[in-house]
Amino acid sequence: MSVQGKATLRLLDKADKEIRKLPRSVKGAVYDFQYKFRDNPELPGLNLESLSGVEGERLHSARINREYRALLLHVGNNDYVLVAVRHHKDVYENLDRFKHQINPVTGGIEFMEVVESTTVRAAEPAAPGAADAGAEPEGRAAADTAEPAAEPPASSEGPAERSTPLLADYTKEQLRELGVAEALLPLALKVTTEEELYGLVEYAPSLTEDVLLRLADGNSYEEVLEAVTRPVAASDPVDPYDYSAALARPATRVTSEDTDIQEAIEDRFSRWKVFLHPAQRKLVRRDYRGPARVSGGPGTGKTIVALHRVAHLAQRLPKGRNKDILFTTFNKNLAADLRKRLLELGGQAVADRVEIVNIDRLATQIVAETGRTGRRRWIDDGKALREWEDMLTELGETRWDAEFLHAEWNQVILGQAVSSRADYFRARRAGRGKRISRAQRAEIWQLVERFTMRLDEKGLWTHRQVAELAARIQAEQAMKIAAFEERQEREGAQMLQHLEQSWANLRYPYRHVVVDEAQDLSPAHWKLLRALVREGDNDLFLVGDTHQRIYDNYASLSSLGINIRGRSARLTLSYRTTRQILGSALGLLGEETWDNLDDSTETLAGYRSVLRGPRPDIRGFDTWQGELDALVETVAAWQREDRERAAAATGADGEEPAEQEQTAIGVAVPTRDMVGEVEQRLAREGVRAATIGPDGPRLEDAVHVGTLHRFKGLEYQRMAIAGVAEGLVPHRHVEQYRDDPTRHGRELQRARSLLFVAATRARDTLSITWHGSPSPFLPGGAAAGSGTENAAAGTGAAVDGALFPPGGALF
């Protein structure tokens, strides 16, 4: 076939992922190829030819370099889609294994490689020393670029011994209706184990992957149809032969712009930080009749859903310059990250319509605008607690201890924006544990009044005080708006002529409010947000996961005027963490139950990952110094591996390897003192390290070191968590609450959540170490012995791998 003139070349999303795993020199060749092909696909050196053994003769091959070939679908005229990159030895035999189709449900183009075999064949590396760019075990770098097999592995006992297929309850027609690729239907109905299923979906189109995993999780046909298939179903009739129409549908995820293709080939991490899964589009674009909530475990894309929701709402705003959308979160570091990501996703035009600020800074701005700030100095909870202790000592008060009063003031009075004695008598005290009478509440209120007066006299205040005051200020404003609108409706437009200007300009500050990390906000924060936007369609959209609550903030949204009943969704697929790491992290949560921000419980049932990688390394040592020696050696070894892989990926032309990802390695420890020790030891060994402070890490191109709290919302290729020892995780101070079972349970749960958050920051590799006795949160850790101090020599005691079965907690 002769092609005249320039061609259009698009990159299918699955080809995107394959290219990222190629050696750097091959990535460069792919980029050069696509540029040449678009300019003139008839260039003799490209060798464009039809693979006639494939049905329909749409599949073509073209030469990338001496060793690699591009597989291209000819859509029509001069329109092509690059669907795969393969070594030339893996292209021209058994051509019937290449399958492509227009999915009859979504109308999108799908490409897969199906090998009719009883085992998954191990693929040869794409090139000697090829870098493993993804979350895969060593040696699997080129698995997606050689000859993957969709057939799951057979049981070692042989076909006759196989158990009932996992999907025995479903028919081929049901799977077809849900959107499973036709070529994979027979295989899907044969798999008998979860590992076989993972082997199958690794090479399957994304819809097939999601459908099969959800069914295996125990979701019903109707649930999968509603949650997965219908959101991506085509809105028009699907012609199974019209590839041009299929290419234009959202279900065909392609990259077409030259710069975008270059970014995909170069694997720019920021590009993947804004990727929205097709099944999540419905959550982003839906019109909600009130507040809505999206939950899900780490790495499931909650923040990305929030980002796309903000961009979607911004694009629907009437023309203007006002920042009509508030995008907020608890953590200051996260707010800065959200600002960068929104700019990349929506551009300056979208960013200009959105106020992105962390919730405490927003509260401070609101209070400052009223002139009520004065000259005050901020104090943290530790200093506030000492003020309580000093006041009680001065008063000779022995009925109440400072810890209890400080918590009551923070969580009940300030937390719920309680402004009067009468309101405090009516305030909810859910989760506070210790019951108190009406007379005792009166005593507490009197002490709280004396305490706040003490802070006023000293010119001190806390962030919780400001949040409570901001909530009251904005609630008063909302009441004025309601009164104004009621009077306007009663008296008509003529009343405007008699109103003062300040009344005529009354308006809610925002049309929409979007909240990330919702589990970290206090009731006062929620009262503030409720008052910032008019109640109605699309007013509040929040995402979060209570399993990741690391601050002492608890809320019941319905009691605060935020009703999310019937407008909640849950994400279950992690795009970041391997299932080996995920299984271990889930084990850290134990058998605890978590709330759902609305007087019910939350679960991570069905939470899973299809990424594979090495098991987490769990080791113990006699002393902190021994553990520190091992930690430094681990980090140094990781850096050596990265340098060796980068060197192996250098092209034959001598091209320099790409720079390592800046945020490749993170080290988390329980205390600030340990942060300083780790940073000093790394520096002594020639490892560049930077502490993560309140405003983020001081340096980007360094190993990041911080307390467990500092890693909230961050992501690293490799993660080391050190000091996970008894008395440190959880900290020994939780024992002082044993006489208050509710408070003690909450403190333990927060400590579990903190460790869970840190563990799930890892994308590919996780190391957890301890000294002395292990943390009780490590499954079976209490019975594990400690190791020798000579960790650098590899003699540290490893915790039995059975305690962290790969993926064992996923189903």
Image (cartoon, helix red, strand yellow):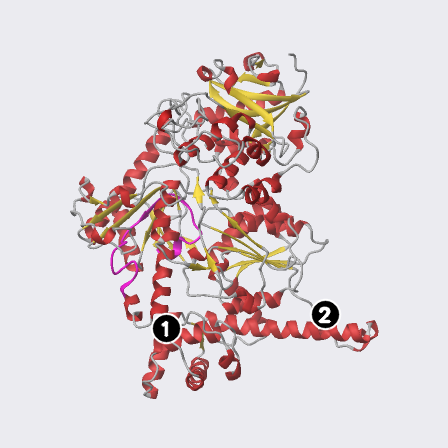
- Magenta stretch bounds: 708-732
Distance from the alpha carbon under mark 2 to that under mark 1:
41 Å
- Could you say which quadrant of the image residue 451 lies in? bottom left
The answer to if 776 sits in the magenta stretch is: no
Is residue 599 rendered to the left or right of residue 500? left
Residue placed under numbered mark 1 in the picture: 383
Neighbour class for label 2 at 10 Å: few (<14), some, many (≥20)? Answer: few
Of the residues under marks 2 and 1, which one precedes in the sequence? 1
- Residue type indicated by callout 1: Lys
**Which residue is nearer to you in this view: 677 or 105?**
105
The answer to if 714 sits in the magenta stretch is: yes
Q: Secondary structure at mark 1?
A: helix
Question: Mark number for residue 598?
Answer: none
Tell me where residue 14 appears, x and y as whole percent. 52, 31
Tell me where residue 481 appears, x and y as whole percent. 69, 72
- Most extreme residue toward the right is 494
Whether residue 567 is visible to the viewer of this picture, yes or no, is yes
Rendered-image quadrant of the N terminus? top right
Is the residue 565 above or below the residue 216 in the image?
Answer: below
